[in-house]
Image (cartoon, rainbow, N blue to C red):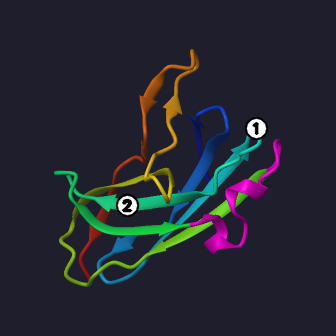
Amino acid sequence: IQPLNVDFNRQVTLTGYHVNQPIIAGNPIYLTLVWQVEAPIEVDFTVFVQLVNAENNIIVQGDSKPQQGFYRTVYWQPGESVIDSYTLPLPGDTPAANYSIVLGFYEADSGARLQILNEAGEFLNDHVRLPEITLVSR
């Protein structure tokens, strides 16, 4: 697990992630996220996970309630860690290149995204971009 410290609106922190390696066209990307619950969450958020190219075009996207809908954010308790896994199917013709995984939370009804804050509580972004990954051809 690669450590991170990404604060989503003082409610949940992304503390780590893991991506399977190597990333090969035609094989799925397996992503594991580790969330630390900081405060009660009253919104039933959906997590979005996108693989984007250098031009920020979405190559593949997977949106889901945490743990495939079995452990929704409204049930998360402060102080607990939640391990959450996602699978992104990659088309076999995906070009070999560097890509980024972009992720965050949104409210399904409104589309409003949960904000990422800095230590002073100021808005930074509405998504996190993980370090680049390299996709290789078959």
26 in the magenta segment: no
- The local secondary structure at tag 1 comes to loop
Magenta range: 65-80
Q: Which disc is residue 39 wearing?
A: 1
- Residue 112 is situated, as x and y percent measured from the top left of the image, at 45, 46
- State the residue in front, 34 or 27: 34
Please state which amino acid type lies under the numbered disc 1: Ala
61 to the left or right of 84: left
- State the residue in front, 4 or 115: 115
Please state which amino acid type lies under the numbered disc 2: Gln
Label pair 2/1, CB-CB below 8 angstroms: no
Find disc 2 in the rendering and name its residue.
50
Which residue is rendered at x = 62% and y = 54% of the image? Answer: 1
- The vertical placement of 89 against 126, above or below, is below
Which residue is rendered at x = 40% and y = 46% of the image? Answer: 131
Q: Earlier in the sequence, mark 2 or mark 1?
A: 1
- The local secondary structure at tag 2 comes to strand
63 to the left or right of 55: right
Q: Which disc is residue 84 wearing?
A: none
- Residue 101 is situated, as x and y percent measured from the top left of the image, at 39, 55
- Residue 123 is situated, as x and y percent measured from the top left of the image, at 46, 25
